[in-house]
Amino acid sequence: MRSFGKRVDGVGGRRRIKRRPVSIQATGASLGDSARGLIIEDICLTGARVMGRDLPREGTEILIRRGDQALLGEIVWAAADRRGILFNGARR
């Protein structure tokens, strides 16, 4: 079971890792696909929630870039225009 962003003690409880709400413009691209604009809505040590149009589907690796910084991860959930990304090296 994937645990990114899941609460450890039910509704109203604490998350496993605290998320930081942000609004950061970036780009995201999967292998063999062109980069698409996206907004990073929240971020933590293990992953991020992003929003954007026509983003890759669940199970796809994605490279997120902003300026000279880049993070590689996997899309672990998808809902409408939002995606949950688990960064490479983070535990599930």
Image: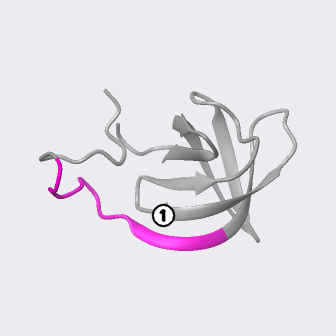
Residue 91 lies left or right of residue 41; in this view the side is left
Relative image position of residue 82 (x, y in whole percent)? 58, 47
The colour scheme is one colour
Q: Residue at x 72, y 64 (%)?
A: 26
Which secondary structure, mark 1?
Answer: strand
- In this view, 3 is above or below 25: above
Q: Is residue 45 above or below residue 74?
A: below
Residue 90 % position (x, y) = 41, 45
Q: Please state the horizontal and vertical placement of residue 10, each as a whole percent of the image.
A: 15, 45
The reply to whether the magenta stretch includes residue 79 is no
Residue 34 in the image, given as x and y percentages of width and height: 87, 43
Judged left or right of residue 72, residue 30 is: right
Q: In percent of the image, x 71 and y 41: which residue is there?
A: 55
Q: What residue sits 17% from the left and 46% below the top? A: 8
Q: Quadrant of the N terminus?
A: top left
Q: Which picture quadrant has residue 57?
A: top right
Quarter of the rendering containing residue 38: bottom right
Span of residues in magenta: 11-24
Residue at the farthest front position: 80
Number of dots carrying numbers: 1
In this rendering, the answer to whether 17 lies above or below 30 is: below
51 sits to left or right of 29: left
Task: Verify whether residue 20 appears in magenta.
Answer: yes
Q: Which residue is mark 1?
A: 42
Q: Residue at x 14, y 56 (%)?
A: 13
Magenta highlight: main SS:
loop
Q: Amino acid at mark 1?
A: Asp
